[in-house]
Image: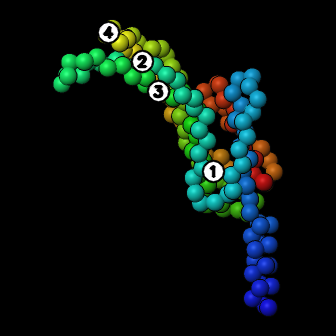
Amino acid sequence: MRVIFGLCLSAFALMANAATIDVSVIEGNHAPQKFTFALSDSREHVDLRSDNSYTAAFRDPATKKDICRDGVFRTGLLLTLRPIEAAEKNEAPLEIVGMVTNLKGLVPGEALSCGTNHTPDLETTDFSDTVVLKKNRTKFIVIDTKYTVLLTLR
C-alpha cells in the first residue's frame, strides 16, 4: 500500500513540475502557428518549410533516352530547439539553431523532348541564438525580418 501511495505521489509531483515551452511563429501577416513542447533533454524541431515542384530533365547516357521527372525543393523556416542545463529554478536556457531558405529563381537549362530541365537557385541563411526563458515571460526573436518567434516557458 505504501509503495502504491508513493508511486502516486511521485507521479503527481512529476506532472506538477513538468514544464512546457510554447512556441508561436508568425510569418508576415499570417496567423501564428503554435507548438507546445515538454521541456526535456531532447531536441525539438519546428519545420515550416513548404514543398515546391520543378521539372528535372536529363538524357540517360546508357539508353540515350530523355527522362523527365518532377523534383521538389523546400523553402521556408526550419528551427531546432535544444534545452541547456539551467542555473536557476524557473528558468530554461534554450539554444535555437535554424535556417531560412528562399527561392531566388528557377534557372532553365537544356530543352529535351519531354521537357526543359530547371535548376532551383536557392538562398539559405543560417542562424543560431541562445535565450534564457523565465517562467510565464515571453521572449521573442525576429529571424530574417520575415519571421517572429515567440517563446514562453510554462
> Which residue occupies the foreground of this view, 32 or 134?
32
Which mark is first along the chain, 3 or 4? Answer: 3
Q: Residue 88, position in %: x, y?
A: 71, 62
Residue 55, which numbered label?
2
Where 16 falls versus 47 (above or below)?
A: below
Dot 3 lies on which element? Answer: strand
Q: Residue at x 80, y 79 (%)?
A: 9
Residue hosting label 4: 113
Residue 72, which numbered label?
3
Dot 1 lies on which element? Answer: strand
How many residues crowd around disc 3 within 10 Å: few (fewer than 14), some, or many (20 or more)? few
How many residues crowd around disc 2 within 10 Å: few (fewer than 14), some, or many (20 or more)? some
Contact check, label 1 and label 3, Cβ < 8 Å: no
Q: Amino acid at mark 1?
A: Leu
Which mark is first along the chain, 2 or 1? Answer: 2
Which mark is first along the chain, 3 or 1? Answer: 3
Dot 2 lies on which element? Answer: strand
Q: CA distance from mark 3 to mark 2?
A: 9 Å
**Quick check: can you spot residue 149?**
yes
Q: Residue at x 78, y 54 (%)?
A: 154
Q: CA distance from mark 1 to mark 3?
A: 32 Å
Contact check, label 2 and label 4, Cβ < 8 Å: no
Q: Residue 133, position in %: x, y?
A: 71, 50
Q: CA distance from mark 4 to mark 3?
A: 21 Å
Where 111 falls versus 48 (above or below)?
A: above
Q: Quadrant of the N terminus?
A: bottom right
Which mark is first along the chain, 4 or 1? Answer: 1
Nearer mark to the viewer, of 1 and 4: 4
